[in-house]
Image: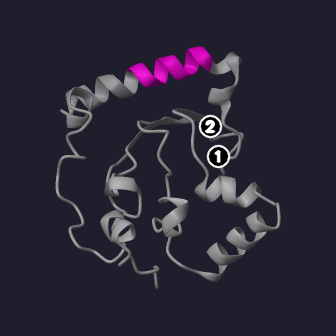
C-alpha cells in the first residue's frame, strides 16, 4: 500500500507519503515524512479528514483536554509503525516503539524497500518526485489560499 497526495491543507500542499507492507502477522508502515500532519495541518482544520459530527466531537474533546482520539486520528506519526494484526486487529498498539521488535521492523522495512525497488517506486531515488508535481492549483482548501487569506473552510 502506498499514499502520496490525496489531500491538501498541509504546508506547501505537500502530501503525506506512506508505504506499507502486510503479511499474515504484521502490518508495517513507513511514514516517509513523519514531521508532516497525516490528516492535514491544524491551521486548516485537518482537511484530509472530511467534516462530520465525529470530527467535531474529536476536536471538542481535545479542547477539553482529552487528546486520545485526536492523537489517533490527527496526531503526528512516528517514522515506523508495526502492528500485530492477529493480536491487535484494530492496530492500536505500535510495536515499533518497543526495542523487542526492532529486528522485525528492520526486516520488514528491508523487504518493503526491496519490493518498492522491484516496482520502481520513484520516491526511493527521488524523495521530492511527487512534491515537484503541480497538484491543487487554486483550490479553495490549498495552502496558498490559506496564506493569502482566501482559504475556505471545508464544507463536506
Residue 121 visible at all: no
Residue 109 is covered by the magenta coloring? yes
Please name the residue shown 41% across and 81% down the image. 152
Please name the residue shown 62% across and 37% down the image. 83
- Asked if the residue at tag 2 contacts the one at tag 1, i.e. Cβ–Cβ closer than 8 Å, the answer is yes
Q: Residue furthest right?
A: 65
SS at badge 1: loop
Q: In which quarter of the image is residue 68?
A: bottom right
> Residue 119, how many percent across, how many down?
21, 34
Residue 140 visible at all: yes
> Residue 62, how many percent across, how many down?
75, 64
Q: Which range is magenta?
A: 102-110
SS at badge 2: strand
Q: Residue furthest bottom?
A: 155
Residue 83: mark: 2
Tell me if residue 31 comes above or below residue 7 in the rendering: above
Amino acid at each position: 500500500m502506498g499514499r502520496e497526495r490525496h489531500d491538501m491543507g498541509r504546508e506547501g500542499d505537500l502530501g503525506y507519503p506512506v508505504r506499507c507492507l502486510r503479511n499474515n502477522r504484521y502490518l508495517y508502515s513507513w511514514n516517509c515524512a513523519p514531521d508532516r500532519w497525516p490528516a492535514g495541518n491544524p491551521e486548516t482544520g485537518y482537511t484530509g479528514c472530511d467534516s462530520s459530527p465525529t470530527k467535531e466531537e474529536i476536536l471538542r474533546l481535545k479542547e477539553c483536554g482529552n487528546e486520545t482520539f485526536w492523537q489517533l486520528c490527527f496526531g503526528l506519526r512516528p517514522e515506523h509503525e508495526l502492528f500485530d494484526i492477529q493480536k491487535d486487529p484494530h492496530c492500536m498498539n505500535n510495536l515499533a516503539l518497543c526495542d523487542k521488535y526492532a529486528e522485525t521492523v528492520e526486516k520488514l522495512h528491508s523487504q518493503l524497500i526491496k519490493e518498492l525497488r522491484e516496482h520502481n517506486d520513484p520516491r526511493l531515488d527521488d524523495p521530492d518526485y511527487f512534491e515537484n508535481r503541480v497538484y491543487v492549483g487554486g483550490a479553495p482548501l490549498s495552502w496558498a489560499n490559506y496564506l493569502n487569506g482566501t482559504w475556505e473552510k471545508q464544507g463536506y
